[in-house]
Amino acid sequence: MNPYEYQQRGINEIIEKFDTKDRLLYQLATSGGKTAIFSFLSKWWIENHSTNVLIVAHREELIGQAEKTLCDIGIGSETITSKVKHPKHHSRVYIAMVETANNRLKRNPYFFKGVGLVIVDECHILVFHKLFEFFHGCKILGCTATPCVQKKIVFYKCPFCKSESHNQDECCNEEMQEWSRPFTMSKIYEDIIVGPSIAELIDFGSVVQEISFIKHYTDDTQLKTDSDGEFTTESIDKAYNNENAVFNVLLNYRELCEGKKTIIYNSSSKANLTVYQRFVDEGFTNVRMFDSVNKSESGKRKELLEWFDVTPDAILCNVGVFTTGFDSREVQAIILNRPTGSLSLFIQIAGRGARASKKIFKDNFIFIDGGGNIDRFGEWSSERDWRSIFFNGTSKEKAKVLNAMDIQDCPECGALYPKNSKQCPECEHEIEVIDRPQSQIEESKDVLVPIRKIPPPKAEKIYQYTINQGGDLNFAWRILINYIVDMFKMYQVTKDTYEKTLANGKFEKRVLALIRPSYFTLKGKSDLQSGIERTMNYFVVQIKKKLDAKYYA
């Protein structure tokens, strides 16, 4: 096992930067191989230094990935679990859960022996820097796909001289105003090294392109944020409780994702149970749910993941559990059934579907955004200035102001007061609160459409997958046929349109236009053998059969 060229380039940049910096952050998109990079870096370190390496993570899956990757490159490691009270020091690389490491170090600052390099996996989770006080003089590397956090720093500013303070003092004979600015990763790490972009990783073959579908909401003014800028569960439930903002998860799953391994991310345990129950009531037996409140019939997390891995068309409902550290390359569809104010969470969730696979043909993945998040952040694969975000955050500093949407005027006296008050403080007029009965809520019957063109089938990718699977030319033909049938589904070609194109001859022309480039490329591959000659008309007939089954079922 050797690092890819871009991975080696990243390792070299880290080594070079460590000449002048002690704390570095390395950014690389999901499935780019962060674990491989810091594993090879660990190997280089112990070969060139007398000190040891400590790798810390916050989830068991990440610990297991690090162990396996180190083993694959010939490096032994010692894993420190909650059961390990005294390390054996039989390896020069330690791997530990962050809380276990912190507890051991608080009792014994010398628990880990001779560490010179500390590596943090998924460092955007702000639970690791408490360890750094135990490793003065060590090099520290944080790794993440998203070097940004939701945390805000609250401070106070004089409205006149602009002086700042941590406390709400008086300045220039006036009380200082409350302000906030984003907490940036540059407050923990000295510099950032940005890895290849998602577009570069797609070209390389590490990840696949998303096909995005979005539900646009016209009124998100009821969404409230917590102190860190994330939307609150209560406000999500309230804002989305009307006929214009009910996203029909089941309908869009049926039309766009059925048969594909799918993860659905809901906003709360209540919403998770509701969505799960809808699928069960509709007769789906391949659906499971997991969150901190609702019990899963699959048992514990480990059993659930095993079920998900071996079930080709599995549907997994959860509440943000399966994000960082969840490594299933066969996920073909992501449904984000909630809004989020966190760029990091948005990218982490979408990225669960981006991993390239050798087990199935996967040229892209479906990303259904049911919370208007693409309107806020752009698409998952959009270019982002991570260096600027590292130093400046994702937003500007701003003063705390009373949101105009949080107040209302009294119909009796006209006084303004908070919406959460049921009585006017001036005239004591009682305000009638009208809640729409659940029965009045009309669920949307809309199936979402892709926000940009779906790329045509790529013959070279079909060829490479066929060779990897030991398939013949007929194997490649089946992939090509299924890909084009999927295009009809994702473009939401109606039965009426389908019948019209059949009648006027446009159906055959369009299918042949899609087939022709791949047909001749694949036929020209001498290592793809087949005993049956197929004409292009054969594909028209086969695709029509599959579409007839869809439209006339």
Image (tube, grey):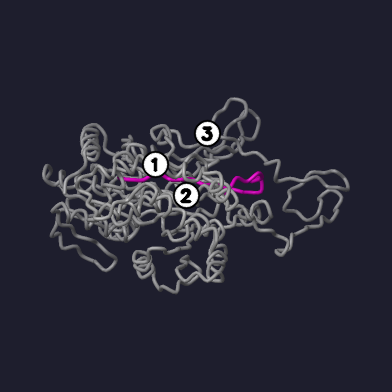
Residue nearest the viewer, comparing 9 with 443:
443
Q: Position of residue 195 (x, y in %)?
A: 31, 37
In the depicted structure, whether residue 355 falls above or below residue 268:
above
Q: Position of residue 19 (x, y in %)?
A: 21, 33
Is the Cβ of the residue at disc 1 closer than 8 Å to that at disc 3? Answer: no
Of the image marks 1 and 2, the number of the one nearer the N terminus: 1
Dot in front, 2 or 3: 2
Residue behind mark 2: 367
Task: Tell me the CA gap for discs 2 and 3.
Answer: 29 Å
Task: Tell me the CA gap for discs 1 and 3.
Answer: 16 Å
Q: What is the number of the mark on residue 537? A: none
Q: Position of residue 7 (x, y in %)?
A: 24, 40
* Amino acid at pointer 3: Lys
Task: Tell me the CA gap for discs 1 and 2.
Answer: 22 Å
Q: Dominant secondary structure of the magenta stretch?
A: loop
Q: Secondary structure at mark 1?
A: loop
* Amino acid at pointer 1: Pro
Locate residue 439: give its quadrant.
Answer: bottom right
Label 1 neighbour load within 10 Å: few <14, some 14-19, many 20+: many
In the depicted structure, whether residue 118 falls above or below residue 155:
below
Residue behind mark 1: 147
Question: Can residue 339 be seen?
Answer: no
- Which region is colored magenta? 206-226
Q: Secondary structure at mark 2?
A: strand
* Amino acid at pointer 2: Phe
